[in-house]
Every structure is written in C-alpha cells, then in structure tokens.
Image: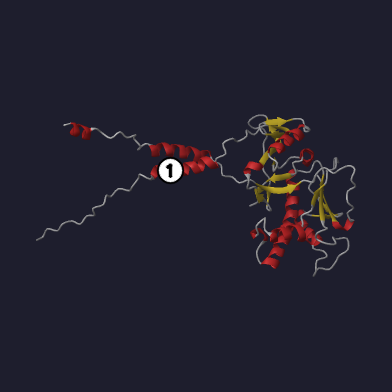
Amino acid sequence: MAHFKKKSANTKQDVPTSAMPDVVFMLLIFFMVTTVLREVELKVQIDYTQAENIEKIEQKRLVSYIYIGPERLGPTEVGESKVQIDDAIVDDINAIRTIMYDKLMEQPRLIVSLRVDRDSDFGLITDVTQELRHAGTLRINYSTKREI
Amino acid sequence: MALLNKKKRPDPEIPGSSLADIAFLLLIFFLVTTTINVDTGIGLTLPPIPDENVEPPPIKERNLLNILVNAQGLVLLDETPSSITEVKQKVKDFITNCEPGNPCVENLSEDPTDAIISIKTDRQTPYNIYINMLDEVIGAYNELRDEKARALYGVPFSALEETSEQYQSIAKDVYPKKISIAEPDEGNS
C-alpha cells in the first residue's frame, strides 16, 4: 500500500496568548511604580560638571533639589545666576533658610542635592550652603555626572 | 423543550481580547515617560553653625593642609604653588605622613586621624574648578581607604557594606574624612 498517513500531532499549533495580559500588566505596574512623574520645570540653565569619585543617592524620596545657574530669559539668552527651589526662583537668599527648615521638619533625613551650573561663581554657592547650615540641613550632595 | 432553549443561549462574557491592547498602550506610555536616571554626586556633610560661646578646639598648624584656589584656578598647597593633578598625591603624602613605614616629615600631619584638609576659594572661583579640587581630595581618601581594606580584609573598600563593622572602622578610626570648606575671600583677584 503506497498510502502513508501523514503524522500530525494532536495538539494545537497556536502559541498560548491567554497569559499575555498578565505579563503586560506586570510590566505596566513595574513602570508605574518606578516612574517619577513630577519633574520640576527648570527656570535656570544647568550644565553639570563631572567628577570621578562620586556616590549614588539610593533613597530618592529623601532628596530635595536646589538649582543654581544662569536664569533662562529666552530660547538662547541667559541672565544672571539665580537660585531655584522647587518651581520658583528665590531672589532673597535669606529666604532659603526658612524654606529648607520647613522641608527638614517634613523629612528629618533630608539630603539636599545642589545642582549647580559648572560656570557659576563659588561665592553664590557658599551663600546658599551657609543658609543650609543655618537651616540645619547638613547633608548635601553636589550633583555631578560621571567623568568619562 | 425548556431544557433545549437554555442550552442555545450564549455565555454571558466580557470580551477580554482587547485587554492586552489597552495594557500595552499604558505600558508604552509609562515606558516613554520614565526616566531611570540615578542621581550621582559628591556627598558632604556640612558642619553645624558653631556656638559663639564655645571656643573652637585648637588645631596644630602641621595637622592642617591648606588648599587655596583662586579665581583663575591656580592652586596653592600649603604656600607652594602646584597643579591640580599633583593634589591627590600630595594629600595622600600629607595624610599618611607618620604611618608605620613612612618617615615622619615635619610640618605634615602627625596622624591620619588628626589630618584636616581645608579648602578655601575665592568668590569668583568657577564651580567646576572647585569640584575638581574636591574630587581629587576625596579620591585621595578613597584610594587610601581602598588600600587599607585590601590589606586588612582582602577586599576593596567599595565591596564593604556601609553598615558593616569593617567599613565603620576604616571610615571612622583609620582614615576619617575631615574636609573643611572655608568661607571664601571677598577678593577681586
């Protein structure tokens, strides 16, 4: 007999897709949890400086940022060096003391990350750190990129 | 007859086939908006404001390494002009001065635990020069701590847990990081 019956498996050929929504949801939840949505709108221009011996800040929730750099006036032009905390520019340096003190009361283990433009004068930064000392926020971090 | 009618009725089900699409859409939105950038930087602890009624403790001149940086980025290390690249080695020499195996040189520190690095700048000094300076000093400390950790425990310092006893003993008792940042001069230089 020249008739051979073709062998074929009894199982279906489809890839099971019923678990796909679960997998996707798991990824979705991971990204939802890790996302930090509220990014501050920068009013100052910051070009980070680089350093070799840097450390990572593991607990992002403890960090409060202070931005120091030339103020953005237009698409290309920049003005004087200014200090920005959260969403506003702080004109009165002495006001930093109360602002940071309030933040310290909310989060006693506060780390202040100073994000400073590389060409800023150090004098302004000293004024800010003096205010931080008065406020009692002693843990600081000079934000830098890794030197390549 | 009644039984047959019941069998023909379709199962009441919520259509779940588009669930994956919806989840994918949300997933892509969060993927795009996420920024997984780790904050990196040089960590420091500022000294608290000194009490006016309390005299600052006396510090021997030889235990203090003065680093002056002016607005042009020129460095003065204990009255000797030097370049930024030399700073790390000089700081290491200064700290390890009287350790066993090293000859005691006069006017360098008596003991690593007593050594204090003082960095002073002008108000006009650019920030990146100051950071380079601080980077060199911290680099010197890190290298020393690393050598010590390898000698004592056979592992690099970075491998030690921050809460472990070994880490604390090196960071506190062997090479404590004492960096003082002095208030800058008003100077117009």
Mark 1 secondary-structure assignment: helix
Residue situated furthest bottom in the rendering: B101
Which residue shows up at 74% across the image and 41% down it? A137
Q: Quadrant of the C terminus of chain B?
A: top right
Residue A113 point in image, percent of width and height: 69, 42
Residue A92 point in image, percent of width and height: 77, 30
Q: Is residue B9 above or below residue B187?
A: above
Q: Quadrant of the N terminus of chain B?
A: top left
Residue B69 visible, this orientation? no
Left or right: B105 in relation to A66: right
Front residue of this view, candidates A65 and B49 = B49
Chain under disc 1: A
Front residue of this view, candidates A71 and A60 = A60
Left or right: B73 in relation to B19: right
Q: As shown in the figure, which amino acid type bears the numbered disc 1? A: Val
Residue B59 point in image, percent of width and height: 88, 54
Q: Is residue B22 above or below residue B40?
A: above
- The residue at which mark 1 appears reads as A24
Left or right: B76 in relation to A54: right
Residue B40 visible, this orientation? yes
Residue B20 point in image, percent of width and height: 39, 39
Front residue of this view, candidates A135 and B101 = A135
Which residue shows up at 53% across the image and 41% down it? A33
Q: How is the image coloured?
A: secondary structure
